[in-house]
Amino acid sequence: MGKLKLLVVDDEPGIRSGVSRILENYTVSYPFMDEDFEFDVVVAETGEEALEILTGSKLDIVLLDNKLPGIQGIEVLEFINEQKMDVVVVMITSYASLDLAVKATRQGAYDFVPKPFTPKELRASIETITKQLFLRRMTQKLNVEGRQVRFQFLSVLSHELKSPLNAIEGYLRLMQDKKYGDSLHEYMEMIDRSLFRVQAMRNLILDMLDFTRIESGKKSRKLEPIYLCEVVQQCIDAFQPFSIQKDVDVYLNCSEKISIQADRQEMEIIINNLISNAIKYNKQGGRVDVNLKRDGSRLILSVEDTGIGMKKEDTEKLFEDFVRIKSEHTKHISGSGLGLSIIRKLLDLYDADISVESEPGEGSCFTVMFKLTEDV
């Protein structure tokens, strides 16, 4: 349950106590809001008292009478505007002062409530204000987070692409100048390193494309029954050259056909990322076990490796955007820090959960739990 702090500024005791009574135990909810909202009401009978409360505490809504002893309500509104306070102001006014109320709305007040008002009228106004406040703050949050994501996106992209490009250019210039003679054999290590860098850049670009498509909501989906064991086996086969290169054995443990209503490409992205990480962060001569089984109404996919593992505090931030666990063991391993973030975003589409257990030096186990679908 969310809570909004509401200040009533009025010199009439009946208005102050009436608003408090009307909003007591009153909640506002909309389908698009994450939670219901209730109200914590504080009161002030003068403009001076209102300024003191506004300065000393964080408020969400202000119900403000203009005609006050001392400082007038319009002056309180001007103070709120000057301080750029993130509050919604609603003027409380008599019918004789409607012109003043209209003027106040032009100066930043969201609306006005003529008095006397009924409980139903006040609650209807508060309901509208709460919706407006929620949407405004959500927009502000999205704008801030959007700028941050774009900044991180460009920072990662420029850094992760610049380094391998510089290395490849360096190798090509050495080959162009024939620094190590005319024999192609002398340059094979440089070629291998360049190809490794190219593959790393390709993986980064693919991760970025997946990430931006998911974030923008523009990724097209085709939900259909698919046999997950077959998808997992095809992913394992695709990684065979990489696993041979790393001297890591990958095994699939799936004793029965299990189907799930899903987008095949999304499942491939999830499984590919999990298997890729299990191989990439494994030890020479290591092992990866991909297990798929039913458990009551759930379908459980786990990918367990014998790799370098990680600390518990590192596992808690693994699924954030652009996060990479940095250690002595990972500094020479390329990555965008987006793979697990993409997995989490895709799993959210299926209302599925993912967890990780890991021990430094012992390996990691990632477990995904789907709601089970009927076999096709």
Image (spheres, grey):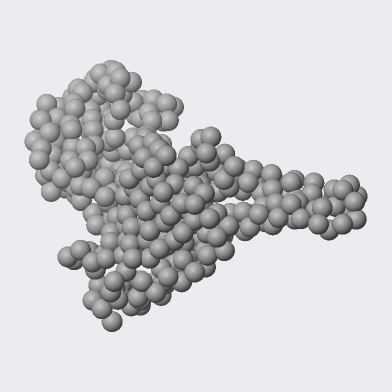
In the image, residue 3 above or below residue 209: above
Among the 4 quarters of the image, the one containing residue 223: bottom left
x, y (%) of residue 157? Answer: 61, 48
x, y (%) of residue 292? Answer: 31, 65
x, y (%) of residue 238? Answer: 52, 68
Q: Could you tell me which residue is drawn at 70 percent across and 51 percent down?
A: 193
Any part of residue 192 in sight: yes
Q: Could you tell me which residue is drawn at 20 percent across and 51 percent down?
A: 29
Q: Is residue 152 left or right of residue 120?
A: right
Among the 4 quarters of the image, the one containing residue 76: top left
Camera-side residue of 293 and 209:
293
Any part of residue 104 in sight: no
x, y (%) of residue 324? Answer: 49, 42
Q: Quadrant of the N terminus?
A: top left
In the image, residue 20 above or below residue 275: above
In the image, residue 371 above or below residue 156: below
In the image, residue 82 above or below residue 28: above
Camera-side residue of 318 and 73:
318
Q: Is residue 212 left or right of residue 297?
A: right
Q: Is residue 223 left or right of residue 122?
A: right
**Number of numbered discs:** 0
Q: Could you tell me which residue is drawn at 19 percent across and 27 percent down?
A: 42
Camera-side residue of 97 and 325:
325
Camera-side residue of 350 and 227:
227
Q: Quadrant of the C terminus?
A: bottom left
Q: Could you tell me which residue is drawn at 53 percent across and 55 percent down?
A: 247
Among the 4 quarters of the image, the one containing residue 66: top left
